[in-house]
Each structure stands twice: as structure tokens, then as C-alpha cells.
Amino acid sequence: MPDCLATPDKALYTDFAVIWPSGGEPGHICEQGSGALADTEGTKTGEPAAKSGGRKPRQQEQSLRFRVHEVLESGRSSGALGLAFEALLILLIITNVAAVTIETMPQFGTAYHKWFNYFEIVSVAIFTAEYVLRLWTAPEDPRFSDNPTRARLRFALQPYMVIDFLAFAPAYVALFIPIADLRILRMFRLLRLLKMARYSPAVSTLIHVLSQERRALFGTLLLLLCVMCMSAEFMYIAEGHVQPNVFGTLPDCMYWAIVTLTTVGYGDKVPITQLGRLIAGVTMILGLGLFALPVGIISASFLSEIRRRDFVVTWNMISQIPLFAGLEVAALNELMVMLRSYMIDENLPVVVAGEPAVAMYFIVSGQAMMETAERKIRLNPGAFFGEDALLQSKPYEATVIAHSQLRLLALQASDFAILIRKHPGVRRRIERISLRRQEKFHKRRGPDVEVDE
């Protein structure tokens, strides 16, 4: 065991774990609360190099698979390679939809038929490779980290993966079944546009909103159908005997009713009696109200989803932060008002080194990764960061990125100043805990690891 962890004191690891940089021994993690150093690939730290040499290819495979998974799933958040891959796929999707559209125009489809085929082959090859790579890296997703085969099967049934499969599968159908209707296959090629949902947070949010509000939307649909049937029946009674060729059947009247309710009004079916015109006017007004309902439901839910990171601060949440344990009631009451709460998605930055300090953050749930020039620190629930920058009125010295979905409490700089001025004990507590953490880092410097504070 390295000297950096020889001390029996494990208190340091209740809030965070240290991941030493590549300058020391790469791949070693101080696990939370364990007081032991474990290799990220599962080998013991004291194991001789010769003993672990046989496992190196497996370790390299896992490392490569994790990197590929990070590029595929995190996109631009994983770095320049992820950003390039994401941009390439978005461009490929857009050009595919444009190609499918232009190919139906005789002057282009006939003249450039060969080039359209070449482009389709390249596109299918890229989409197929992307799909296979996503399946290969599926075990890297914590949700699918059980048996690799079972994990990949479950991963393949995810909505986005089904869309990815439909994006290239029709091409193989056309290859092996030449008699297949090309018009239907072309329609499936347009499904490639749905792949954009993976790279557009707004589209993903809208899909989630529609799923969340499906019961309310279904209710408005039923109401619309009821009003349509009633309007069609009234119009059939009022106009059926006057215009038998126009309103002579109930289906004809239903067609008129839905066109009128949607305020389209083609003008191909027009009532001529006073009663019929009255029914038409009432139907138009009802149509405006009925179609305003789903619009209001979707827009309100969409706005709520965008702001879903904000949630109510409760006593239960505050009690999960060790720093607040034992504070006087007056200080806790003020904190309840001052603290703002957020949900941060995985791989998104919370603070960036060099930026002005605007708040101090407390982790309620999830994990974050604090990255400095010398080391990485994993922050677990109950940890806090940003306090030094606020206390010393300087920019953030480290970048903190969400390692998983984070639930945070934020104390703005202005509120922080008011709190420590009114309650000096809070400042002393923050300074004491911060100093204790730094001292424990100094004590845990190993002979083969150089960590500069």
C-alpha cells in the first residue's frame, strides 16, 4: 500500500476520493471510505508488474471501450474528438434528408443517380459502424453494466437505438429483397432525421414532455372527438336534407366538422341555412378553445422541463450536508431562504477554473469531479466546493464537472457574505473544514506521487 494512505484516518474519504494524476501511478483511486488504494481495472496496487502483465490487453480493451463510449455518448463534452464526431453525424443526417428529397426530382435523380447510390452506401456504412460501436460500448453505461450480452440486448431496445437501427436497416432490406417497394424504403430513410433528437436537447426535452403529458393530451383528443361528432350530428340534422350531396352522410359532416374545428375552412362544404351557419359559428369558437388546450399543456410542461433543475429546498436536503449539522436554528432558517437548488446533467461543468466566483456549492446527491493541474478529486454527496474563492474574493482555482447527474445547493456570493457576517460561526466552520481537508492531503502524499497544493 502506498504511504499516502498508510494513516488509519479515513475521515477524508467520507466526502471525496482522490484520483492521482498520470504523473504518479495512473489508474489508482482512493475509494470512498475504504482507506485503501485500488486499481481502476481491479488489480491490487501492490501487485507486481509481471503478475498483472497478462491482463494488460484486457485493460487496454476496457480503456479503449470506455473512451469510445465517452465519445459516442458524451459528444462535445468528451473533448475535440467527441465534438468532431457529433458535428460529422449531424452533417451526415442533414445531407441524407436533403439527398432523399432531391433524388425524387427527375432532373437530379436521373442525372446523378450513381452519385446518390455512392452517397447512400457511405452513409449506411457510417450509420452501421456507429450502431455496432454503441452496442460494443453498452456495458460502459452504468445502467447496462451487468452481463455484457444481456446488457447489449437491453441497450438495443432503447428508443434511440431503435431509431439508429431503422436509419440503416431498410438499406439491407433493399439489398437482399430487390422486390421491396422503394417508396416505402425511402420513407424509412427519412427516419434518419429522428437521429437529430440524440444531439438536440430541445428535441429530447419535447419528446420527454409529450411522454409526461400523454394522459392530458389524450384527454384533450377525446374531447376534440366528442365535439367533432356532436357538431357533425347537428350539421347532419340541419343541412342533410337541404344539401344531400354535401352533408348527406355523417362521415361527410365529420369531415366538415374537423376542418372547421381546426379553423382551416377549405370552403368546399358550406352551410346555407341559418341554423347551419349558427352551428358552424359555434364549432369554430369551440375549435379555437380545444386546440388552445394542448398548446397550453405542452408549453407549460416544456417550460417546467427546461427549469427542472430548480426544485424546492427542504429540511431533508439540508440535513444531508454535514457542514450544516449542528448549526443554530436562526442560521438554518436563513439558509433555507438563501440556498438555490439545481439539477446538473452528467458531464456538464458546474464551475470552470479562472472564472469569477459567483457561488459556493453543496452536493446533495450524485458525484462531481474536481480537476486541477495537479490532481483530480471525486466529490461525493455532502461535499462542498467554491468556498476558498468566495472567502478570498478570487476566481475559481479548479474546474468541477458533474460525474453523474448532480443535485446541488448553491449559495450565491452576496448571500454568502451576508451569512458569514451575521453568523461568524459558519465562516469559522467552513474555514476549519477546508483547512482540515488540505492538511489531510499533505499527510497523504506518497513517495511516488507528487501533489502540489
Image (spheres, rainbow, N blue to C red):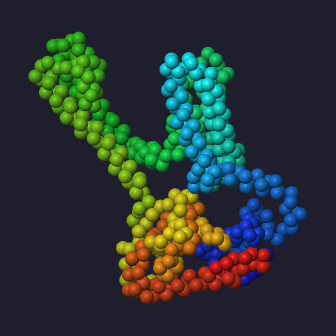
Report the residue at 10% width, 22% height from top. Answer: 274
In the image, is residue 99 above or below residue 51? above
Q: Give coordinates of residue 149: x percent, y percent.
A: 70, 44
Q: Residue at x 47, y 79 (%)?
A: 393
Q: Seen in the image, is 113 located left or right of residue 428? A: right
Q: Left or right: 33 with respect to 219?
A: right
Q: Quadrant of residue 173?
A: top right
What x and y, as percent, mark residue 202? 45, 47
Q: Can you say which quadrant of the picture contains the N terminus? A: bottom right
Q: Eyeballing the image, is 12 above or below 74?
A: below
Residue at image position (55%, 37%) is 93
Q: Residue 267 in the image: state x and y as whole percent.
A: 23, 21
Residue 424 spot, x, y in % from top left:
43, 88
Q: Is residue 144 visible?
A: no
Residue 287, picture quadrant:
top left
Residue at point 54% right, 86% down?
432
Q: Nearer the viewer, residue 167 or 280?
A: 167
